[in-house]
Amino acid sequence: MHKRDHELERAVQRGDIRGVAQSLRAGASPNASTGVYPVLVAAIFSGETSIARLLLESGANPLLGGPHHYQNPLIAAVDRGDAAIITLLLQKGVDPTRTRPGYATALELAATKGRAEVVACLLAGGVNPLSQDPMGRTALHIAASAGHADVVRILLEAGVPVDVETPQGMTPLAYALHCDPEEELDPILPEARYHVVEVLVSRGADVSHRDASGCSIDDYARERQDAKLLCLLEPPADDTNQRDCDKKGNIVA
């Protein structure tokens, strides 16, 4: 590694923006590597937005990453939740739909992580909110399953149909209720699930829907043995389309 590049790397690792600027002026490459991935990715991982911006404005390659998928600048910024850098990367021509086979796109990762600001940023950058993963899930299915009501709202406002189906006929509401074996590794708080169900139902989700296997929304709710979820699926008593259920599933007046 060139001495100036090494000095740049050290400045990035310290979070020293003045040192970064000085190294760049002295001739260091904005594409210098830490030995594993470019200094741009290192800055993004460290949350050094100003340094990442300086590197990009100095000519850092926005497509240059490390050997692993998560070491891609855009994916690293999504994982970090850095909407400012994502906006700049998109302005630099990064394709937000580009990914490696078998890995999540930027929108799918943002929906999984519950990065509402990032989701809004990606949609503003032209990402198709109806794009599907290899399982046929949209970001709305993913956000609903992960318990991220704020992301669910953003995607619905972006025009995703509330009852959009996977090839198996599952809607986002079904995904919000479905018992996923992997959930034990990353459990979702019941309150988060309630909020997602409330949002979907209030936006007109079909609570009588059945998927291709014949399972109904009610079947999925009963599988969880959660009385409040069943209550939230009940039609409202008036035309406000609002339900207020306690944890035992009783409708609160």
Image: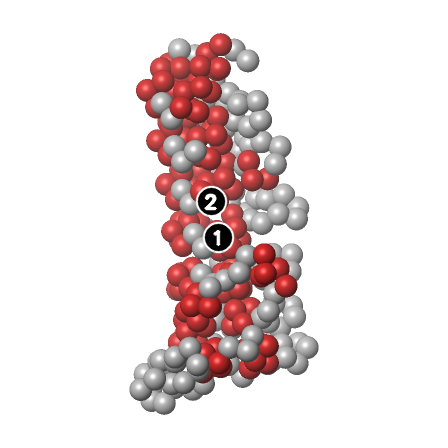
- The kind of secondary structure element at disc 1 is helix
As shown in the figure, which amino acid type bears the numbered disc 2?
Val
- The kind of secondary structure element at disc 2 is helix
Tell me where residue 24 appears, x and y as whole percent: 40, 17
User: Left or right: 185 with respect to 51?
Assistant: right
| 12, above or below 93, in the image | above
**Label 1 belongs to which residue?**
113
**Label 2 belongs to which residue?**
78
Residue closest to the eye, 28 or 196: 196
What's the distance in space between the residues labelled 1 and 2, CA to CA?
9 Å
Tell me where residue 129 appears, x and y as whole percent: 49, 58
Q: CB under 8 Å between callouts 1 and 2?
A: yes
Report the quarter where the C terminus lies.
bottom left
Query: Which residue of the protein is positioned furthest toward the front in this rendering?
Result: 248
Residue closest to the eye, 228 or 130: 228
Tell me where residue 151 appears, x and y as whole percent: 43, 59
Mark yes or no: residue 75 visible: yes
